[in-house]
Image: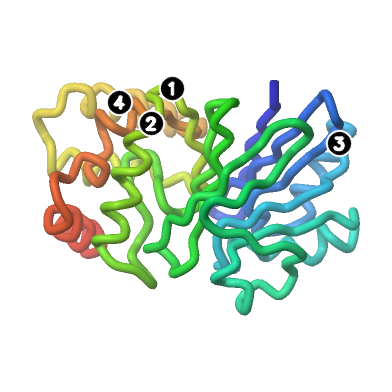
Amino acid sequence: MLEVVRIPVLSDNYVWLIHDPASGDTVAVDPAVAEPVLDAARQRGWTIGQIWNTHWHGDHVGGNAAIKAATGCTITGPAAEAAKIDTLDRTVTEGDSVRIGDHVAQVMAVPAHTAGHIAYHLADDGIIFVGDTLFAMGCGRLFEGTPAQMFANMQRFAALPDDTTVYCAHEYTQSNGRFALTVEPDNAVLRARMEAVEAARARGEATVPTTIGLERDTNIFMRARDVAELAQRRAAKDAA
């Protein structure tokens, strides 16, 4: 069994540490900064051997160089964004795979938030690292892509097993859910989820990871019926 540790950094980012007890391998996913990530690994007696980047934004790659300097780790990221991530050792795209010990992650191309955004899906472990493409009850802003791309991403994620655990990179759940309620006020599952989210945030607790099944029931972007509806919802959320 892989161990996954959430490291809160900056104002609302999450860096994920993945550890394979069998091999001793440890991966940092989207390290925005270095020291909290290195500290979290040291506290557990782990050595970071890899970094997996999902996209080029600074709050996902900002810790790359310092972690590599401290550990000699190998950094993997999207081939389409190699020109924007100067610390990469390996580039990957749709259909490629990466490994942590004997655990294999398939690379999925999920452009829209950025032009070359990727996700890492460990199907046998039932987990996926989605960066800024899918959030709890939300999706990423369309900085470099189109509503059609994001709709395709949402449909692709929705096709994964319900119990797939989704590790996203930001604590946006409360604001996403409040907006979702304006779109689907009669969604009983959404209302119940938001009650739990509001209570968790009041206690200072994190609300991610999430699951594909929960997102299918409550994520208005995954539930959009077509590209036009997703586009309308994304534009309204951007303006909210």
Of labels 3 and 2, earlier in sequence is 3
Specify the quadrant of the image occupied by residue 31. Answer: bottom right
Q: Quadrant of the C terminus?
A: bottom left
Left or right placement of residue 112 versus residue 70 in this view: left
Callout 4 amino acid: Arg
Q: Quadrant of the N terminus?
A: top right
Callout 2 amino acid: Ile
For the residues labelled 1 and 2, say whether their Cβ atoms are less than 8 Å apart: yes
- Which label is found at residue 193? 4
Of labels 1 and 4, earlier in sequence is 1
Q: Nearer the viewer, mark 4 or mark 3?
A: 3
**What residue does disc 1 label?**
163
**What residue does disc 2 label?**
212
Residue 59 point in image, percent of width and height: 59, 62
Between 69 and 124, which is closer to the camera in this rendering? 124
For the residues labelled 1 and 4, say whether their Cβ atoms are less than 8 Å apart: no
Secondary structure found at label 1: loop
Cα–Cα span, label 4 and label 3: 35 Å
Between 202 and 60, which is closer to the camera in this rendering? 60
